[in-house]
Amino acid sequence: MGIYFKIVLSSLLLVIVQHMARLIYTLGFHKHIYNHEPGPCKYLDGVDFGSEDIATLPDGKAFITSGLLMPSATATYRQMYADKGVKGQIFLFDFKAPGSGLTPLTIQGDFNASDFSPHGIDYWQDKASGKVYIFVVNHRRKLDAVEKFEFIPSAKSLKHVHSYVDQAIYFINDVAVTGENSFYFTNFLNSRSHFWGSLEIYMMLPLGSISYFDGNYYETVEEGYFMPNGLALTLDKKYLYMATSVNGAIKVFKRQLKAGQLTFLQEVKLYTSPDNPTINPLTGHLLVGAQPILHTTSQTMEDPSKPSASQVLHFEVNDGILYKTTELYTNDGSVLSSSTVASLYGNQMLIGTICHKLLHCEVRTL
């Protein structure tokens, strides 16, 4: 064996070992969870298979996506989804009347509800008319879309207004709305298939991006990210937050309000896997649902009957910049499996999941 071949082989083995070590560390095999709650917590009846994202209005009305079926879902996941008769839904919860529980919203208009797998969600409220528009990421069977609905309070329903479909939208995770017809979105992975998506994940390929639709054109404004996940805009729409799940960070960008371009401001390393950030509509502070042990989350995504850890972090915000982090909730999966999002309103908090329950907690630790 020639000396040059030995050098190449040794270098290749070193790269493989380094990559495997990084992957094992990222998946959290070394971590242990200590359970704690911010106050009394209980499940909300009506949600048994996911509450992936939440958008809460200033008046306390919260819209919750349920019934997520990712394009890259495994056969086991799909079979359980079918066996349980799961369907994509949007639920309404009123923080000002928590005893009323959850209301499933019906969908009006020309919309195929059988091809509805809701993921990320956000809203736009028209200041003049008071109308509320809900924007939802929809993993259709053949392609992804962003669905726009008008909320009809009197009928407890959503009226379908428009489907945004474009080649720029291929495997999206979340949406952050800037106007009645404009929004940011993350392309989470480059492939919708389970095999190629898994390869992209385990190779840790930075193929994800943030794009912006200004009402007329789609434009990629940030790229080169590995699995960019949830988005959230500050109340004044001046700053955008993005969660990077596997790299375990929240990135803060300042917006150019007219053009949609982004300027990087801050990165906060979390040593956990953040999923969806949300803004407290009363205080402007940031809340993040996370999965602290990724290898258990991976097991849940393979088989929803297997539990995985949950976590919620709270950040105080000053002019867009994050500081003073507080851990509000952690659980090893015995109560709540794979938390994805949390929404705080007053002293109440909702915690959503990929394919498990929806938890309502009193917050006594802030």
Image (cartoon, grey):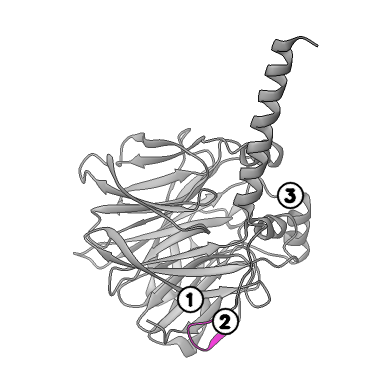
Image coordinates for residue 74, horizontal then vertical, percent: 73, 49
Q: CA distance from mark 1 to mark 2?
A: 9 Å
Residues 215 and 175: in front is 175
- Whether residue 119 is situated above or below residue 152 in the rendered picture: above
Circle nearer the N terminus (2, 3) = 2
* Magenta: main secondary structure: loop
* Residue type at numbered disc 1: Leu
* Residue type at numbered disc 2: Leu
Label disc, if present, on residue 350 of the rendered structure: 1
Q: Are the two marked residues, 1 and 2, in contact with CB atoms closer than 8 angstroms?
A: yes
Q: Please, what secondary structure does the residue beneath circle 3 have?
A: loop
Label disc, if present, on residue 74 of the rendered structure: 3
* Residue type at numbered disc 3: Thr
Q: CA distance from mark 2 to mark 3?
A: 27 Å
For mark 2, what is the residue? 44
The answer to if 303 sits in the magenta stretch is no
Circle nearer the N terminus (1, 2) = 2
What residue sits 57% from the left and 41% below the top?
143
Label 3: few (<14), some or many (≥20) within 10 Å?
some
